[in-house]
Amino acid sequence: MIGYKPPLYFDYPPATYTCTGLTRTRTAITYTDFESLPSGWANIGGTWNIVPGGYKGNAIRGIDGHNGIGGASQFYYGTNLNNYNSLWVTTKLKYVSGNPYVYYGLALINLQLNRLYEISIEQGGFLDIWSYRVESPNDWQILSQTSITNFNLGNWYVLVVFYQVTSTSVNIQAYLYDVNGNLVAQTSANSISSRRFTPAFIGLEIDDGSANYDDFEISTKDLRIITFNNLQINM
């Protein structure tokens, strides 16, 4: 049959995959390595300063002041992005201090700056997705949680988030990698509340402690570089 493409068959051993890096392309809306304070950013609560000891070079340190959205603190890219129905976001992040419950990660914020979705590492070794004033009208609601494999509080991690807004829900997918590119946690959530929103602002979040962040990026495309091991194809 002209043009027929036979199916691909995958034999054991099963394939394993590693995220070997993140790449910047023309699809990037913004990128910053936090060597200095980026222009066009704003904070809601907390203290945000450039410090040494980043993943490479400097980092930005967020210290929660309990005076931002939901009693946490946010530092966000100040361009309104609610004309996008889906985006990829990534940052490197590392715990600094706080006890016993510190949440550090990314925030997807509404236009009015009073509701958000938080995708965060929980100090106890979990990857969480939360909403604030969405599922619960005036409070936090956890949407998803999964444990992080071999979690080490002193390590840098790479958090990658994809969200997609449809007519019926906001779908959020979260992937966490160690710095060697190994996937150590992934989870997802669907927000179907009538108070759901298309994210307008995207940035960093710290709740009950402090953390460092490096290499933040927003993109229209998946920027992960994936390699597959033990992959065999029989045709």
Image (cartoon, rainbow, N blue to C red):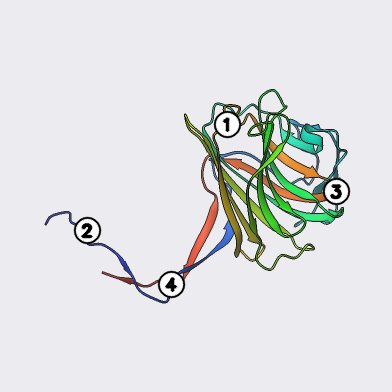
Q: Which residue is mark 2?
A: 5
Q: Quadrant of residue 156?
A: bottom right
Q: Is residue 150 above or below residue 171?
A: below
Residue 14 image label: 4
Disc 2, disc 4: CB below 8 Å? no
Disc 3, disc 1: CB below 8 Å? no
- Expressed as whole percent of the image width and height from the top left, the position of residue 169 reads 51, 34
Quadrant where the image shows the N terminus? bottom left
Q: Which residue is mark 3?
A: 209
Closer mark to the observer between disc 1 and disc 2: 1
Residue occupying image coordinates x 22% and y 58%: 5
CA–CA distance in space, label 1 to label 2: 43 Å
Closer mark to the observer between disc 2 and disc 3: 3
Amino acid tagged 4: Pro
First along the sequence among labels 2 and 3? 2
Amino acid tagged 3: Gly
First along the sequence among labels 3 and 1? 1
| Crowd band around label 4 with a 10 angstrom C-alpha radius: few (<14), some (14–19), many (20+) | few
Q: Which residue is mark 1?
A: 193
Classify mark 1: helix, strand or loop: loop
Amino acid tagged 1: Ser
Closer mark to the observer between disc 4 and disc 1: 1
Nearest the camera: 55 or 47?
47
Disc 2, disc 3: CB below 8 Å? no
CA–CA distance in space, label 2 to label 3: 55 Å
First along the sequence among labels 4 and 1? 4
- Is 157 on the left or on the right of 60, as rendered? left
First along the sequence among labels 2 and 4? 2
Nearest the camera: 210 or 222?
210
Nearest the camera: 33 or 185?
185
CA–CA distance in space, label 3 to label 1: 29 Å
